[in-house]
Image: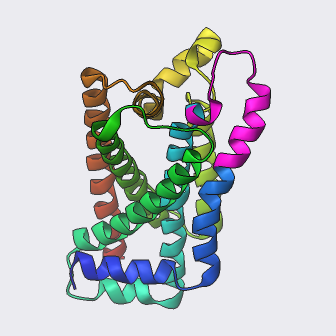
Amino acid sequence: MDVFTLLHRNIKWRFHNAFTIVMTILQPMLWLVLYSAVARQSMQGIGIENYTAFILPGLIVLVSFGACSSSGIMNYLMKTNGSFYRILIAPVKRNSIVLGQILEAVLCTFLEVAIMFIVSLFIGVKITSGWIGLLLIVLIVFLTAFFISALTYAISLCLPNEVVYETVMNAVVLPIFFLSTALFPADTLSSGLEIAIKLNPFTHVINALRDLVVQGNIVTKDILLVFMLLAIMCCISFLWAIRRLKKETSL
């Protein structure tokens, strides 16, 4: 049993019913339409011409959290029906199990982000940085989803049930999202909030995506900084997930 076998198995598990498929399609569309409609009214007068394009990078991060967090829920469901433990006793490396789980969440993230991008094209959003910018966006989304999925998988192995897991994830995701530049520019905030927002790593991810989507700027230094930051975070979360899975095996 290799990574791709586990990946295929996880994809089948996620999309085993029609409700999951419908929610995967509708969720990014609803977030884009609702956030752009509601926030546009409250953010008038701050000098942003296309607010939908402005918030799109932040919604990409939010969609990534949503898609990857659901893989943690799937982990609990697999424990309930015993398939999680059947995989553990199979002749498969622990890093392959983790990688199969992560890649499934990454693919789901790409699906939801692609849907959101397609919808945004119909409401005035254009990617102004060309094909190179699009490739950089894909790489940033991949690394972001990889980090979040490894992190959520590790967290799901630390917590006793899905109720506690969802509570913890809400406590993590909401501050990360709102204490960033997802919905508003940093220069409109007080100095205390601005410091907190700059310490949020996803602020830099969102700003890099916004430069590529809205402004069409490919600032090599900023892009490399984001890649290095995400690469370090990916390595830490991946190693933590493997360690937690090995500890689960030893119990």
Percent coordinates x, y for residue 195 in the rendering: 53, 16
46 in magenta: yes
Location of the C terminus (image quadrant): bottom left
Q: Residue at x 49, y 54 (%)?
A: 113
Depicted 1 relative to depicted 32: above or below: below
9 in magenta: no
Give whichever of 214, 82 is nearer the camera: 214
Q: Residue at x 58, y 20 (%)?
A: 185
Depicted 107 relative to depicted 215: above or below: below
Q: Main secondary structure of the magenta part?
A: helix
Q: Is residue 10 visible?
A: yes
Location of the N terminus (image quadrant): bottom left
Depicted 81 relative to depicted 111: above or below: below
Percent coordinates x, y for residue 97 in the rendering: 29, 74
When asked about the image quadrant of residue 220, the answer is: top left
Residue 34 vs residue 69: left or right? Answer: right
Depicted 79 relative to depicted 60: above or below: below
Give whichever of 248, 154 is nearer the camera: 154
Q: Which residues are magenta?
A: 32-53
